[in-house]
């Protein structure tokens, strides 16, 4: 791992633990094992580190989970969709960068308008838009009944988001969360399936 990568990893851990204002450049450098002036060879300052972390997390999230812009392949069956959704959920629950970034953003959203917008985009608006597109595709394919895709997107994602936030607070309940989420998805499609299961 390069020094630049160590700085980013250490900064994210400290930001998630202590908050942005509660973390100094000196503390990041010390935890990396370098002097503060050496850190400035890689980053202009703490805000530059934060911006790099946001860019990395957003790219990683879009590539492995998806977004409203990049929905990815939509399975042609309900069982395939459930498997794909559980894969994405496991990623977001367990990926160390995404998990730490989510914990950091949840804390900082009340201190920074910019971070509040990023949190809302990832945990509400972007998720809603992505699943609305996916559900519209499933409706068009006749896999689920035609209904209000915005409401269905809320219905399918809200319980999942609640359980992910619980796992962030209580990591030991991950198995319980995944079991409930799978049950929730099965129930959702039992309710809205168009007889094509």
Image (tube, grey):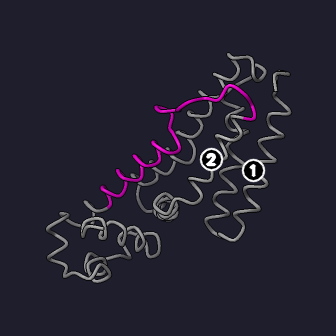
The residue identified by callout 1 is: 181
Q: Earlier in the sequence, mark 2 or mark 1?
A: 2
In the image, residue 73 sits, relative to residue 9, either above or below, namely: above
Measured as percent of width and height from the top left, residue 197 is found at 82, 27
- Quarter of the image with the N terminus in it: bottom left
Coordinates of residue 150 in the picture (x, y in percent): 66, 29
Q: Residues within 10 Å of mark 2 (few under 14, many from 20)?
A: few
Q: Residue at x 52, y 39 (%)?
A: 126
Quarter residue 76 falls in: top right
Establish if 94 lies above or below 7.
above
Distance between the alpha carbons at the discs numbered 2 and 1: 12 Å
Queried whether the magenta region covers residue 189, the answer comes back as: no
* Secondary structure state at the residue bearing disc 2: helix
In magenta, the rendered stretch is 50-79
In the rendered view, tell whether residue 172 sits above or below residue 108.
Answer: below
Q: Which residue is located at x 48 percent, y 64 percent?
A: 100
Please report the residue visible at 62 percent of the width from the left and 53 percent of the height from the top: 90
Q: For numbered disc 1, what is the local secondary structure? A: helix
Per the image, the residue denoted by label 2 is 87
In this rendering, position of residue 163 left or right of residue 114: right
Give the x, y percent position of residue 102: 51, 59
Q: Residue at x 35, y 76 (%)?
A: 23
């Amino acid at each position: 791992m390069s020094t630049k990568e160590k700085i980013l990893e250490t900064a994210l851990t400290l930001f998630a633990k202590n908050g942005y204002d509660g973390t100094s450049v000196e503390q990041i450098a010390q935890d990396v094992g370098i002097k503060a002036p050496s850190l400035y060879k890689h980053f202009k300052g703490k805000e530059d580190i934060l911006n790099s972390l946001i860019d990395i997390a957003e790219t990683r999230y879009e590539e492995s989970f998806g977004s409203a812009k990049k929905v990815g392949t939509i399975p042609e069956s309900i069982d395939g969709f459930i498997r794909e959704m559980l894969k994405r959920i496991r990623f977001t629950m367990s990926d160390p960068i995404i998990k730490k970034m989510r914990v950091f953003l949840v804390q900082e959203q009340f201190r920074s308008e910019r971070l509040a917008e990023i949190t809302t985009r990832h945990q509400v608006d972007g998720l809603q838009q992505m699943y609305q597109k996916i559900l519209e595709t499933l409706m068009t394919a006749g896999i689920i009944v035609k209904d209000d895709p915005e409401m269905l997107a809320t219905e399918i994602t809200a319980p999942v988001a609640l359980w992910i936030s619980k796992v962030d607070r209580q990591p030991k309940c991950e198995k319980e969360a995944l079991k409930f989420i799978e049950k929730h998805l099965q129930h959702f499609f039992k309710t809205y399936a168009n007889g094509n299961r």
